[in-house]
Image (spheres, grey):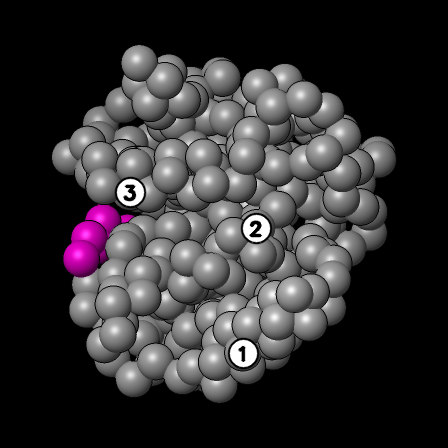
Amino acid sequence: MKRQVFLAFLVILLSSCSRQPQHFTNDVLLGYTPVKNQDTSQVCWAYAMLAAIETEHIMRGDSVNLSVAFMEQMVAQEQEAPATKRGTCLTALRLLQKYGAVPYQTMPTAEYLPPRQVFMLGCEYTFGEFARSVCAPGEYIGLTTTEDVPYGEMAVLDVPDNWDRGECLNMPMDSLLGITERAIRTGHGVAWEGDISELGFDWKKGYAVTSWWNGRTTDDHCMSIVGLAHDEEGERYFIMKNSWGKKNPYGGLMYLSYGYFMQKTIAVFLNKDLIYSTSR
């Protein structure tokens, strides 16, 4: 019996490894700001979290495009931050509240100096005031899956890049996936943190599908989720906005299968109201 179960599992793995989707149909595509390119920097966490906030505002009828360069300069002021400036989406949320934010057009790259104040739609803001206008304290929450604490409790995100010891709400992966899908269907931006080291992740082809799993999940990359799709066989995908420029078949977007999501997700970050509305 055990041998039969193993063989069945092996067949499933082999079929998923050879699976190469040919066509995607977008079911939901939220608004998003232009795809950016992080180049050699290691601040994908800032690109992903700010992109999720931008999408959130676009779907509310607002327009905001935030400067990653400003956040990159702010993280350099943190004594505990590594020289690489690596971090998590929790780092981005904390830095927003500590240092504030500026619009992208004010400081598009690190070569620009931070402005003294922020001007937007005829109004004048301090960095902190502007940040709070686009992301209120406590507006976002991180969700993760771990065996270290009971479900429903907060857990320190156990990855090396979480040098500032940020916490996420622990829940089963199927619940985490369901809340993420609900967020997109109701027009909310989501940031994703996960593992892209698997063979099934193919930037050049523009998709990520399940593949041979090496038995561990590493914290490699962050992207924002901007939509839902399915392929020609009905398999479902999240549409990801990456920060590697536009040189792939989908102009910088990627299709990440639900199977890959469940296998390789470290955490997601979304509006905390979704947790309470889902539990009703």
User: Which residue was labeled with disc 3?
Assistant: 184
- What's the residue type where badge 3 is placed? Ile
For marks 1 and 2, give the CA distance: 24 Å
Quadrant, the N terminus: bottom right
Residue 80 spot, x, y in % from top left: 84, 35
What's the residue at 57%, 50% (across, down)? 265
Residue 46 placement, left or right of 6? left
Mark number displayed over residue 265: 2
Q: Closer to the camera, 26 or 87?
A: 26
Q: Closer to the camera, 147 or 109?
A: 147
What's the residue at 62%, 46% (across, down)? 266
Magenta region, residue range: 27-33
Mark number displayed over residue 270: none
Could you tell me if residue 240 is visible in this image? no
The picture quadrant where one finds residue 171 is: top right
Instruction: Tell me if residue 31 is in the magenta stretch.
Output: yes
> Which of the marked residues, 1 or 2, is nearer the chain's N terminus?
1
Secondary structure at numbered mark 3: helix
User: Which residue was labeled with disc 1?
Assistant: 11
- What's the residue type where badge 1 is placed? Val
The picture quadrant where one finds residue 29 is: bottom left
- What's the residue type where badge 2 is placed? Thr
Label 1 with label 2: CB-CB less than 8 Å: no
For marks 3 and 2, give the CA distance: 16 Å
Number of numbered discs visible in the structure rendering: 3
